[in-house]
Image (cartoon, helix red, strand yellow):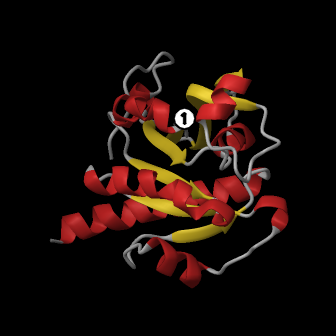
Amino acid sequence: MASVGSDPHGQAALGTSALKILIAGGFGVGKTTLVGSVSEIPPLRTEEMISEISGGVDNLVGVENKNTTTVALDFGRITLNDALILYLFGTPGQDRFWFMWDELALGALGAVVLADTRRLEGCFAAVDFFERRSIPFILAVNNFFGQQLYNVDEVRDATDLDSHVPIVQCDVRHRESSKSVLATLLEHLIGIAAQRRAS
């Protein structure tokens, strides 16, 4: 598997792999929350207050109480074991910041696309982005307020995802739930690597 750029602590020399993972999805879907819930370091956040001007540009339907927005990226790190570190890069969700996605995707091994079933169309651009670039991803349905409105089969039908793309339910406010999402992505990536070796 691939490793990521700089290695300030010499971890690669100790046999540690560092993997770059993207956390993507629509505006207000929980990307910043997911990164913050699992990061072992204080996460880097580039949030700004939502102003009246941005409120007129960004679609706030369904997230009317949201008062900050990511304008560049979120960054966090989680050490899964002695041999594996994940670097998490959360993408901005608003249309006007999508130009940054190509830069953030460089060197990414895989991605989590977060979805909110109250505003499912918000995940379509991220799904399309990763499909076009052949970057493996999973879809994680963030159940706001613990409400599971639709089951996995209903979400798969609504998003028209191929059967090989895993879909999981989660609540990214909780560390264990977010860790489970990342574990599902890693299992998916391992499966893809095994298929490639076998073919």
Q: Residue 104 location in percent, x, y?
A: 41, 32
Q: Is there any visible trace of residue 42 in the rendered image? A: no
Q: Quadrant of the C terminus?
A: bottom left
Q: Residue 32 location in percent, x, y?
A: 67, 38
Label 1: few (<14), some (14–19) or many (≥20) C-alpha neighbours in 10 Å: many
Q: Would residue 10 be found to the left or right of residue 128 on screen?
A: right
Q: Would residue 52 be found to the left or right of residue 59 on screen?
A: right
Give the SS element for disc 1. Answer: loop
Q: In the image as oriented, which residue stretches furthest toward the bottom? A: 153
Q: Which residue is mark 1?
A: 92
Nearer to us in this view, 183 or 92: 92
Nearer to us in this view, 132 or 56: 56
Q: Residue 195 location in percent, x, y?
A: 26, 70
Q: Amino acid at mark 1?
A: Pro
Q: Which residue does the image show at 65% across and 66% down from the upper left?
A: 117
Q: Which residue does the image show at 74% across and 30% down from the upper left?
A: 68
Q: Which residue does the image show at 45% across and 20% down from the upper left?
A: 10
Q: Which residue does the image show at 20% across and 64% down from the upper left?
A: 197
**Residue 143 position by quadrant:** bottom right
Q: In the image as oriented, which residue stretches furthest toward the top? A: 8
In the image, residue 89 sits, relative to residue 199, either above or below, namely above
Q: Would residue 90 be found to the left or right of residue 133 on screen?
A: right
Nearer to us in this view, 146 or 97: 97
Nearer to us in this view, 7 or 67: 67
Q: Residue 49 location in percent, x, y?
A: 74, 23
